[in-house]
Amino acid sequence: MAVAPRGSSAVAPAALTLANHTCRQIAIRLLPFLFILYITNYLDRTSVAYAAIGMSRTLGFSDRVFGLGAGVFFVSYVALQIPGALMVERWGARRCITVILIAWGSLTVLTGLVHTPGQLYGARLLLGAAEAGFFPGVVVYLSHWFIREDRAKAGSNFMAAIPLSFIVGSPLAGWILGHPWLGVDGWRWLFVLEGMPAVLLGTVAYFVLQDWPREAAWLAPEQRQWIEQRLEEEKPRLERSITAWQAMRSGPILLLGSVAFLQYFMFYTFAFWLPTMLKRQSGFSDFRVGLLGTLPYVATLIAMLINGWHSDKTGERRWHSAVPMFIGVIALFGLITLPASMKVAVVLFTLLGISEAFLPVFWAMPTEILSESAAAAGVGLVNAMGSVAGFAGPFAFGYLNNRTGSFSSGLALMMACGIVGGLLVLRVPASRVPAAISSS
């Protein structure tokens, strides 16, 4: 017997109450914990941004070494994303997410032991491999629990975790950097103290997460029956998925991937180099640099929520993706051309943070312009193309700094990416079904 959509008038009041209560209970049980895991994920991934300040002092690492160390993470991260997702699907999310968390937390702690550039590169490469399966694995996991009409809302919670992780992590990292303990440098403690929560949360995940609704003792039998039946009804029937090779020849997918690469080039360069730029320009203490480093991400969080809400309200995607990028371009132009001033720089860095309001709107586009069979392969390829910029951006910025002795060349390269990316996103095909009429 088919299950009517939750919002359908054909649903009896009792059934509607059961559906709403079940979906709400699943969201309350799973999303806060997964949200905390994603914050921890970003803290561990980007802890090297603040550790670089201490590394340059005690180990003498150059900008080029740091840029390569920050970027090499994404070599293994990109290469193992698809195998990581398949591993979660085959062996179960509870076991895999537990192992992933403990592995990446342990490797973050061990990064505090590095003394040479080679050791830094090796630690970052291993960390990328350990974290690769987490995000695609959680996407797979959400599809086991959330019906289609709730899946986008569930996924959007992870986007908010990105700026929040920086808001929490920046002042914390700055404080830890300035407090050596037991004769050990603060930057080494930073890796230890930010890696340990992942190890602990990995252990907790084994007991909190269940792979499927049928295993959830915290749902009533009728709730388990309803969600399992609804998810079964939504499984695609007789639909042929496109291959990775076909996805690589798809114009819309390649266009989306190019936009993702250009925008991620801006984002990851900014995320990894902001603490160093603030430190060198201001000369402030590590803790004060950490406090200032939160301002751009507060702006990111606010702009992300407003931009996503307004895009959903109007049904418009392209301009809501392009305008944040153009705002970032204006900020970068100011950083390059205006006279050096710490107050002006902080304002412009904060304005640059608004460019990340691009993310939730952009990631609503692939499933709206691609057929369902193409979306699965398309989203994976777009995400992989974008993540390559996680290596290219920080490395290129560090290389240019080393060659020129100035941040201006790297900022100009970021600005060029913003201009081209903003123009390209305006060429993305319109949604097959405009959001304003999608209920028809």
Image (cartoon, rainbow, N blue to C red):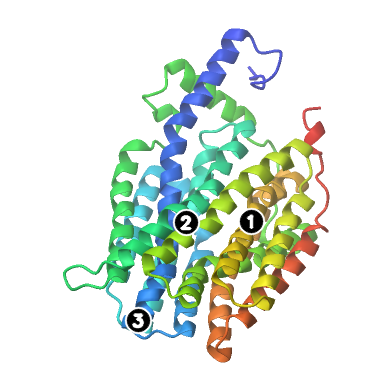
Residue name at image x 38 percent, y 68 percent: 286
Quarter of the image holding residue 93? top left
- Residue 283: x and y in percent read 43, 75
Which of 170/320 is in front? 170
State which quarter of the image contains the C terminus.
Answer: top right
Q: Secondary structure at mark 1?
A: helix
Please name the amino acid that badge 1 sits on.
Ile
Please name the amino acid that badge 3 sits on.
Arg
Please name the amino acid that badge 2 sits on.
Phe
Residue 416 placement, left or right of 410? right
State which quarter of the image contains the N terminus.
Answer: top right
Residue name at image x 79 percent, y 44 percent: 316
Residue name at image x 50 percent, y 48 percent: 161
Q: Which mark is residue 354?
A: 1
- Total marks shown come to 3
Q: Which residue is mark 2?
A: 166
Mark 3: few/some/many CA within 10 Å (<14, 14-19, 20+):
few
Residue 152 placement, left or right of 29? right
Q: Earlier in the sequence, mark 3 or mark 1?
A: 3
Q: CA distance from mark 2 to mark 1?
A: 14 Å
- Residue 321: x and y in percent read 73, 53
Q: CA distance from mark 2 to mark 3?
A: 23 Å
Above or below, comparing residue 200 to residue 227 in the picture: below
Q: Secondary structure at mark 2?
A: helix
